Amino acid sequence: MKRSAWPAPLRRAVEVPRFLWHLACWGRPSRALLFGPLSLGDDLLCTTVLHEARRRGQLLTMMTARPELFLGNPDPARLLPIDAYYIRGVKKLGAEIIHPHYTRPHPTDPHRDLLPSRHIIAEMCHLAGLTGTVTLRPYLKLTADEREAGRRVERQIAIHSTGLGAAIPYVTKEWGADRFASVVGALGQEFNFVQLGSASDPALPGALDLRGRTNLREAAAVLAQSVCFVGLEGFLVHLARAVDCPSVVLFGGRAGPETFGYPANINLSTPVECSPCGLREGCPHEMKCMTPISVEHTVAAIREIIARPPGPLAVATASLP
């Protein structure tokens, strides 16, 4: 029998002692951010909300399953683990738990999301009650030793072949590992590719294989020491922006660069009448948004972004009423 089906007195007998123990350990936050236990990229995006809240003197606690994303970051008031009993209890005691979920389920299509009309970071800040100008970039702090360890080879380009190994995969973001392999082949004589991602991702011949061999901070350090990152829209794009690594990003029709991208990057996308669709799977148009993005276009974009003069990356802002 599921615990939710237990009689109420039995549930309370289990929940109350656990909640009281957590309350004694952690206290009651007044306001806390919580995206969810699977929200790797979204927890990273919460660093912007925390940063903008601190700028306004509105400190927020962060509830997260990945505290390593926030090491050395002064913006959260503190970090708390995610525990359902504790969350329910502190809400009853008056704590405000903010869920900055920027997408909503489509009312008639279970495979589709409704996307915000503005950048997802701006939407998250809005949902946290922030107003005024917000900066649209995430943050991650690396130590000097961590950063130095990220240099694996000379003239390294970080690359990612697929997002299907993610906790929440989206088929409608895929470009094809064979095409990424062709990118490595086209530039392999000039640059050294370092492949990040899950151990189950397709290997890219000619790339230094770090699939499943780095933790989050090690992957961030590799990105910080790379001349650029190339991959699909997803966590590693946000991680690259957090450590100031420019990227070449391939966007399908699920969501466009205007809501999920950064101006510091070269965002490759194809305008089609059915985009942005918000689909997670089941594209009825054979991914015609991705097909026109060729290996040649991607290689040219990589050359272009590497040729840019060094300096601070461009940063977008949004004004929230």
Image (spheres, grey):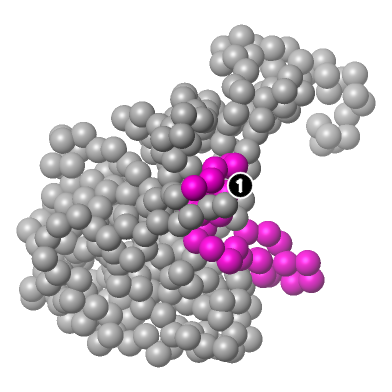
Neighbourhood count class around disc 1 (C-alpha, 10 Å): few under 14, some 14–19, many 20 upward: some
Q: Quadrant of residue 276?
A: bottom right
Number of numbered labels in the structure image: 1
Identify the residue at image location x=24%, y=58%: 313
Identify the residue at image location x=37%, y=63%: 262
Residue 207 in the image: x percent, y percent? 20, 66
Q: Does 262 sit above or below residue 2?
A: below
Identify the residue at image location x=83%, y=19%: 12
Q: Is residue 126 magenta?
A: yes
Q: Secondary structure at mark 1?
A: helix
Residue 7 in the image: x percent, y percent? 92, 26
Quadrant where the N terminus sits is: top right
Q: Nearer the viewer, residue 291 or 102?
A: 102
Q: Nearer the viewer, residue 132 or 311?
A: 132
Reading the image, the residue beneath label 1 is: 127
Whether residue 54 can be seen here: yes
Q: Is residue 2 magenta?
A: no
Q: Amino acid at mark 1?
A: Leu
Residue 311 in the image: x percent, y percent? 15, 57
Whether residue 198 can be seen here: no
Q: Does 87 sit above or below residue 45?
A: above
Start-end of magenta stretch: 103-132
Q: Nearer the viewer, residue 123 or 107?
A: 123
Residue 109 in the image: x percent, y percent? 74, 72
Q: Nearer the viewer, residue 59 or 99?
A: 59
Q: Quadrant of residue 18?
A: top right
Q: Left or right of 15: which side holds 99?
A: left
